[in-house]
Amino acid sequence: MPKTAIVTGATSGFGDAIARRLVEEGWRVVATGRRRDRLDALVDALGGPAAVHPLCFDIRDETATRAALQSLPEGFRDVSVLVNNAGLALGTGPAQDCDPDQWRTMIDTNVTGLVTITRLLLDRLIAQRGLIVNLASIASNWPYPGGNVYAGTKAFVKQFSLGLRCDLSAQGVRVTSIEPGLSESEFTMVRTGGDKAAYDALYAGANPLQPEDIAETVRWVVSLPPHVNVNSLEIMPVSQSWSPFRIHRDGPG
Ligand code: NDP
Ligand code: 8X3
């Protein structure tokens, strides 16, 4: 009997690649997102409804999330892996220029949505001695100009992951925080409001991570024996590394 994984945000980028990789490995996958056409295309591409069950809902909406999980058919209910991947960044400007509505959207999606679906699935994950994989970011670990609230949400995701580890280790539930760096996906189109020139400039000559690289990482984490927990994994393309601290001279500070 194949085991079931739920991948949030499976309509593009990492989530799409993770869903595909897990189905290749023989998993049944519950694929979530708001874009129904993309979910339907994923079901068709991966062998139909026996392998993939689509759940179309906005993860910011607790009622919709609860109803979607309750609607899962036999064969997809006993979730043993939760990949909390749905998320977004909005904006790259300094805090003083940011739109508070964009801040709220990031918090509602990356923090509130993530903890809500996790809580709703905890009993099932405990019953299965399951695994939670949370998509955090290098922004969880390293501040950068314009990261402000996005980075704050991702720091939360990492720390929430480590806290879940403490609470769930006695139940045999594993928790992993994955912290990718520069990765090519629609993420940057969303973040920049569809600025293709900014997208092209960010990735130009950088040989960034691809969604398949993250999917392969998730496949590996999921394949480890049940007594092995990867706490956190920070992953960058080789082209990306650190800069020295900057110093603004002769300013008001
Ligand atoms: P994409 O923009 O390609 O995918 C984001 C996914 O999240 C989509 O499937 C989208 O589905 C879903 N999503 C966003 N908002 C909602 C919502 N309100 N309700 C339901 N689903 C939602 O980005 P990535 O694949 O690159 O990013 C995936 C995760 O990885 C994110 O959490 C991101 O923060 C993180 N990450 C990304 C990095 C990068 O550089 N790309 C690096 C490090 C971490 P839909 O629009 O259909 O609802
Ligand atoms: C996405 C990676 O560096 O843009 O989480 O924050 S970064």
Image (cartoon, helix red, strand yellow):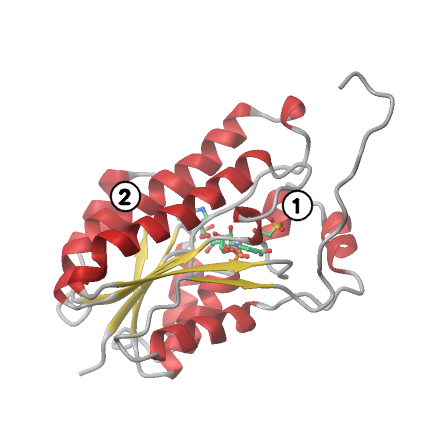
* Apparent side of residue 99 relative to residue 170 in the rendered image (left or right): right
SS type, badge 2: helix
- In the image, 241 versus 149, the foreground residue is 241
Quadrant of residue 219 within the rendered picture: bottom left
Q: Would residue 83 appear left or right of 69 to someone viewing this image?
A: right
Of the residues under marks 2 and 1, which one precedes in the sequence?
A: 2
The quadrant holding residue 176 is bottom left
Name the residue rendered at 48%, 37% in the picture: 106
**Ligand 1 within 8 angstroms of badge 1 C-beta:** no
Indicate which disc residue 116 carries. 2
For image coordinates 61% across by 58% down, the residue present is 181
Question: Disc 2 vs disc 1: which is toward the camera?
Answer: 2
| SS at mark 1 in the image | loop
Which quadrant does the N terminus fall into? Answer: bottom left
Give me the residue at 50% from left, 38% from top.
152
- Residue at image point 62% right, 61% down: 183
Q: Position of residue 104 (x, y in %)?
A: 46, 30
Crowding around mark 2 (Cα neighbors within 10 Å: few <14, some 14 to 19, many 20+) is some
Query: Up-down: is 101 above or below 27?
Result: above
Residue most extreme to the right:
250
Crowding near the residue tagged with mark 1, few <14, some 14–19, many ≥20 C-alpha atoms within 10 Å? few
| x then y, percent, for residue 213 | 55, 72
Mark 2 in CB contact with mark 1 (< 8 angstroms): no
- Residue type at tag 2: Thr
Q: Amino acid at mark 1?
A: Gly
Mark drawn on residue 194: 1
In the image, residue 101 sits, relative to residue 138, either above or below, namely: above
Q: Position of residue 224 (x, y in %)?
A: 34, 79
Q: Is residue 54 above or below residue 104?
A: below
